[in-house]
Amino acid sequence: MTDPVSAQILTATTADADGVARLLHEREPWESDYHLLGLDPEAAIRRMRLLIEDPRVLTLMFTIGPDRFPIGATQLRLDTGAIINLRGPVTSPGIEEALVDELITHARVRGLKAVTLSVPEDAAAAVAERFGMTVVERDPDFTIDDLGTFMLLSRSVDPGC
């Protein structure tokens, strides 16, 4: 019998799309990423379902207990090594680190050389240190009016590096 309060990192299925979409795009009731993406919440859930079904994207979620409701989630583009979403509870920062470590294991098994993450420029140094990444360059493909310029971070998945 499984301990009902045990923490697990699971691969998300389409049945998890609602919980993952809400976790990744809602911050506080008055603030969300939906407006940045131009999506209403239902459109974000449909988009998440498509990402979960996409064989080029691995979606992992951190759950506690038997209900599979995520308290942390992340996604990795398996063709490029880009981490495209990462969110965990502010009160438990270790959850995001556990998710990144799991992504690195999956990336290594799939033969990727590195994973990358785009973050707002003002947070780049702190995020790079937190996840053992290196600031590579200004991300030429990623600018959001409300958040400004983003920096591209990278981390080797080679265990010897």
Image: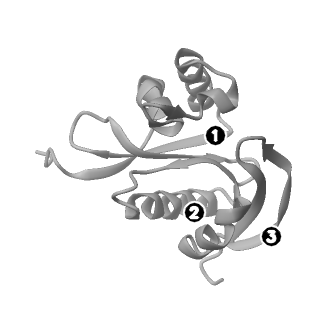
> Which element type, helix, strand or loop, lies under badge 1?
strand
Determine the residue positioned at 51% across, 34% down: 31
Which label belongs to residue 57? 1
Q: Seen in the image, is 150 located left or right of residue 88?
A: right
Q: Do the numbered discs 2 and 3 sit on residues whose CB atoms are within 8 Å?
A: no
Q: Nearer the viewer, residue 87 or 50?
A: 87
Determine the residue positioned at 43% across, 51% down: 88
Q: Residue furthest right?
A: 140
Total marks shown come to 3
> Which element type, helix, strand or loop, lies under badge 2?
helix
Find the distance from the CA under tag 1 to the CA under tag 2: 14 Å
Q: Is residue 113 visible?
A: no
Residue kind at label 2, given as amino acid type: Ile
**In this rendering, which labeled residue sits more in front, label 2 or label 3?**
3
Find the distance from the CA under tag 2 to the CA under tag 3: 18 Å
Residue at the spot of label 3? 136
Q: Nearer the viewer, residue 132 or 102?
A: 132
Which label belongs to residue 11? none
Q: Where does the image place residue 137, in percent across and percent down from the top left?
A: 84, 66
Q: Where does the image place residue 78, in percent across and percent down from the top left?
A: 68, 48
Q: Seen in the image, is 61 located left or right of residue 3?
A: right
Q: Seen in the image, is 138 located left or right of residue 126?
A: right
Q: Seen in the image, is 56 located left or right of residue 86?
A: right
Residue kind at label 1, given as amino acid type: Val
Determine the residue positioned at 72% across, 67% down: 154
